[in-house]
Amino acid sequence: MRPEILFPLFAPATSLSGVGPRFAKLFESLTGGPAVLDLCWHLPSGVIDRRYGPPLAEVIPGRIATLTVEVDEHRAPPSKRLPYRVVCHDSSGSLELVFFHAHRDYLMKMLPPGQTRVVSGKVEVFNDRLQMTHPDHIAPPEEAERLKAVEPVYPLTAGLSLKVVSKAVHAALERLPELPEWLDRGLKDREGWPDWHEALRRAHNPRDEADLSPLALGRRRLAYDELLSNQLAIALVRDRQLKQRGRVLKGDGHLCDKVIASLPFQLTGSQRLALAEISADMAAEHRMLRLLQGDVGSGKTVVALLAMLTAVEAGGQAALMAPTEILARQHFQTIEPLAQAAGVGLTLLTGRDKGKARQAILEKLAAGETAIVVGTHALFQEDVAFKDLAMVVIDEQHRFGVHQRLTLTGKGKAVDVLVTTATPIPRTLMLTAYGDMESSRLTERPPGRQPIDTATLSLDRLPEVIDAVDRALTRGAQVYWICPLVEESENSDLAAAEDRYRALQQRFGEQVGLVHGRMKGPEKDAVMARFAAGETGVLVATTVVEVGVDVPNATVMVIEHAERFGLAQLHQLRGRVGRGSGKSSCLLLWQGPLGETARARLKILRETDDGFRIAEEDLRLRGAGELLGTRQSGLPEFRLADLAVHGDLLATARDDARLILDKDPELAGDRGKALRVLLYLFERDAAVKYLRSG
Ligand code: ADP
Ligand code: MG
């Protein structure tokens, strides 16, 4: 149960005076949440300094000024299109206040002739006259000192003015309770951090730009609070998981040996090391939850298969879950001959299996006749049952689905889990998503791989690119042509791809294929199959070209509007080529003007194809949320912490969380109780449930 002290913060924003349902809705879309607390966490992004207030004669045009003036007269315009003017003066000069679409009655009330008023806003010179258009503030003279302040500027959204947002945020801050300190005193003193309440107050009352920096002490403290709650929550879940007894899965090697013998290649050192780590983990008493990271083409599939076979050797069943239909099929095709070599029952289960055929598959799984199943989300369906599911491999590519992972593991007893990902995850991000989850990395490429030549070209040089495609086709090579990601809609994505398809068809005729997200499954498969068989030479695709697709003869990758793609995504797409023994190239076509980030991204791609380095650079360039090219990555998003700048705090938070739980595993002491409040504050309620007296 949420502690009572937090109730005012979790009350809906409508509980604040002046916030009705209409504003509340806008606030929710602005701050990402409906509560008073969400407003407290809506931090300013800028400041307006209103302290400047010289006599009119000395005002420097272009600046924001707060001026005390006497109102002389109102000049209503002869036409509605012209502005309404209010002439004012002080002892040194004069000023005109300018209003468009003015309401005379209102302005007469605000600015009565003969009275003194303080006005604040940007001063400009127009036709040699000093003027201020739509002052931000108009107030009686006694408020001059109050107005002459530094005012925070908040990020806004359509329908919300700065005034409305500032007012609501400050009303929300009035509700801040005094919370018990959850930070370690030593750390807090060392860092010079303020109390939580004071930190928030400071964050909302910046005096200058420096106060807005994420490195300002108050902001760092708030970021740390958030990271600590994240690390503490993960540590709690993890402790619980480790305490759960897993099962000991020890293979005798009879199946693995057969598969290894039938491989046309030797395992790389990296693969062998990863396998050793995985089988040690499977043989241990606790449940395995391990990540297998490796670039596209680094050979994860074989490793995953051998791990599954180990589970089968130990008498259990195994499942491999792919994020898409195409990938599931591809994995199945790769694994099928190897499973046959080992004499192991293998089946495929996707959403396309229906009726009797599906029923037959399910029966074999339930009876244990099928040892390994490869599939898609279809594996999660309720009626899918196993005789004895012992191990699950989740091929996440760049998708993360913690919930799905749990659903599938619920289908067996103490199931060991291996998650494979082709997006190398920087250490920092690993921590936020998985805590200290074990990970194996395939850093070595299988031998014989040619490096990929990467060139960046302006889209103006399209004709040259098409000539290059022509030469590639003449040599018998195949080409992927990835069409631009269009922001607005899937439809425009499709239109762009169809246009390109037609244009290339005019030049290359029937050799061109098209695949896109709107196609039905079998249709998509047919196009892919023709390309894989070499019947088509150019495959035009929207980004739906599933990242795991393997066509060794495809050696040219063209990506249009590369500037619109994320770094990780470009790296993934590039990894589609360079899979065979031929020399491969990647042409990144961009359209200017290029922003600084886009330029830096393209440069990194030219410089390296080391996925781990690319991931680190991506994190640095774009921040964590966008790292995976999609906001729906499932990685936690932070409100106050920005890993690109607060990365150093994460390791501290991890160690802190460990230490806390070692000393006070039930969070029962004074600091422990304060930490519970912290967990609730950041809505990690689920983690608190793991505590005995939660
Ligand atoms: P990933 O899933 O990591 O992208 P795959 O497992 O699909 O990579 O492997 C890519 C290709 O490399 C496959 O054709 C696979 O047969 C091959 N391969 C895997 N391991 C090796 C190895 N040790 N030596 C040579 N080729 C390998
Ligand atoms: Mg793969």
Image (cartoon, grey):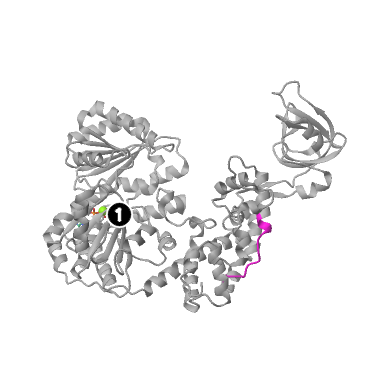
The amino acid type found where label 1 is placed reads Asp
Mark 1: few, some, or many residues within 10 Å (few <14, many ≥20)? many
Q: CB at mark 1 closer than 8 A to ligand 1?
A: yes
Q: Which residue is mark 1?
A: 295
Apparent side of residue 133 relative to residue 603 in the rendered image (left or right)? right
Percent of width and height locating residue 334: 19, 53
Is residue 518 found inside the magenta-colored segment of the image? no
Residue 634 lies in what quarter of the image?
Answer: bottom left
Say above or below: 315 vs 202: below
Residue 119 visible from this viewpoint:
yes
Q: Residue at x 41, y 34 (%)?
A: 591
Percent of width and height locating residue 662: 47, 77
Predominant secondary structure, magenta span: loop
Q: Residue at x 35, y 60 (%)?
A: 407
Residue 496 lies in what quarter of the image?
Answer: top left
Say above or below: 79 vs 408: above
Residue 448 visible from this viewpoint:
no
The answer to which of 684 and 515 lies nearer the viewer is: 684
**Which span is picked out in magenta?**
172-183
